Image: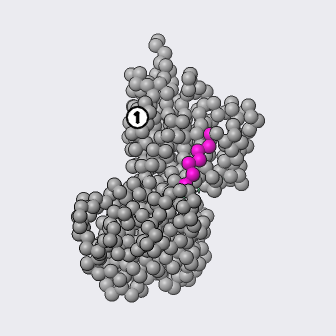
Amino acid sequence: MRARETFRAAVEAVQPDTVVRQSIERNGDSVVIDGRRFTLSHNMHLVGFGKAVLGMAAEVERILGDHLVRGVISVPHGMQQTLQQHGKSHLLLKADSRIKVMEGAKHNLPDDDSLKAAEGIKQLATELTEKDLLLVLISGGGSALLPAPVPPISLQEKLDVTRRLAAAGATIQELNKVRRALSLLKGGGLAHHAHPAQVVSLILSDVIGDPLDLIASGPTVTCEVWPEEVLSILERHKLLSSMPASVTQVLARQGPRWKDSNKHSDSPGEALNAVIGSNTVALTCAGRRVRELGFRPVVLSPGVCGDVRLVSRLYGLLARFACSQEEPSPEIAAEVLRLGPEVGVESWDLCRTMQVLGEGRAEGWGATCVLAGGEPTVELTGKGRGGRNQELALRVGLELKGLELPPQGPVFLSGGTDGQDGPTEAAGAVTDAGLYDEAQAQGLDIDGFLSNNDSYTFFSRLSGGERLLVPGLTCTNVMDVHVLLIPPIPIKIS
Ligand SMILES: Nc1ncnc2c1ncn2[C@@H]1O[C@H](COP(=O)(O)OP(=O)(O)OP(=O)(O)O)[C@@H](O)[C@H]1O
Ligand SMILES: O=C(O)[C@H](O)CO
């Protein structure tokens, strides 16, 4: 219950309307965003793209009123109806809204609908003057919702390149560097088109480290495209020799990609880019909630990545370190530190976390909660149904075996903040040291489910699915959240 409540607090902290409300301060005819004041005189325009921007736009509309003169946002197919069905009308625009909502990018892939939306956004930006302010709302999924291939690349060709890169296991960093090089609006292209208007971007980050130039491929972050870097990414994934001629032609060009645009200015365009919601924000708020629940929180890292097997090993070791009734063995600490670089966690963060866990044990501070986030990966070898959060929780459950402590041992939760883990209805799962015995008693062979990447089926069958985490539509996405609750440890006095 407490792990679920902590996850709920993490998701609550990064709701699209909440993060916008916290980042725009309206004082009469001006607004302050990220410490900068902007004067309003019915000159505010809005564009947005991403899975969470409808709710962000609804809040902007409430805050700016009549000063918002028009807008175009590109959101996932079926978004408005889904929000309506889930009773989330506070995330929908007013009936007489000045913002046009365009839905597209079925299955998170660019399509003709999102291409039309991108054209609408480009058109709006191009028409702005120096008197105008352009507010840009950006969230995860933005890349697919803002496709504008550099001519002569066709949408289909660009889609093929990104699809093949993703299938070859390219990281989001690699993928978005390639997308930037092939797009008129990414990598600062949108800011260029909006010049000479003032441009302010409010960003809900879904990438580890919150890199402005990579979230939704950085449409308002001017950055140099290095064709050599893009070519080496394509080569690394063995795709270089099969690139369409149009792609090779565009990569061979010198100078900015927007040379072909009808904007009569070479200015890269300036923008204020503000990250208003992120995994860090979610973990900080989860920490506050967990304290109210009686735990001492320690945030390990918002950048956990790497293979779920290694990540589960790390959490298993940390739990063992914290729960040991005698002095924890230095070998555990050494193994934790060895794993760090493979799962994206700095030694300093591991040492700090182990220190808090050690203090919790030795000084009898009672319960501790390790909070972390990020986006581990699963190497898919089977054909089952699951997701990285459910697979991680399952593996951590196995790692915790033997750590049963009365009345309750450590508890682990892993959940996707978007409410969806892989192609399943669940966001993740909650496990503890009793998982193995529970599965055995119900005739469920954990290894079999794991080797078939069938974690969702496993958790659905186990105890009537009660370990699944099913928050429903969360309307946000700041990657995954991991919660490791450590109970007070009865220390042996020697
Ligand atoms: N059967 C499975 N078991 C474990 N993981 C899976 C399974 N099927 C898919 N996945 C993983 O789920 C991920 C895709 O799911 P999801 O759509 O939740 O990803 P995402 O990166 O969170 O997407 P977004 O950024 O759009 O939220 C991939 O990392 C993929 O490896
Ligand atoms: O849209 C994208 O590019 C991804 O969600 C990362 O931001």
* Residue 400 included in the magenta stretch of the image: no
Q: Residue at x 29, y 81 (%)?
A: 129
Residue 136 placed where, x, y %? 38, 68
Q: Residue at x 55, y 72 (%)?
A: 104
Q: Is residue 63 above or below residue 119?
A: above
Q: Residue at x 39, y 54 (%)?
A: 18
* Residue 470 included in the magenta stretch of the image: yes
Magenta segment's dominant SS is: loop
Residue 134 placed where, x, y %? 33, 72
- From this viewpoint, is residue 346 visible? no
| Residue stretch in magenta | 467-473
Q: Quadrant of residue 29?
A: bottom left
Q: Quadrant of residue 238?
A: bottom right
Label count reads: 1
Residue 236 placed where, x, y %? 54, 65
Q: Quadrant of the N terminus?
A: top right
- From this viewpoint, is residue 202 visible? yes
Disc 1, SS:
helix
Is 249 in front, or is 265? 265
Q: Residues within 10 Å of mark 1 (few under 14, many from 20)?
A: some
Residue that badge 1 annotates: 291
Q: Respond yes or no on whether mark 1 lies under 8 Å from ligand 1.
A: no
Is 275 in front, or is 492? 275
Q: Residue furthest top?
A: 494
Q: Residue at x 53, y 60 (%)?
A: 83
Is 56 in front, or is 393? 56
Q: Residue furthest front?
A: 95
Q: Amino acid at mark 1?
A: Arg
Residue 85 placed where, x, y %? 57, 59
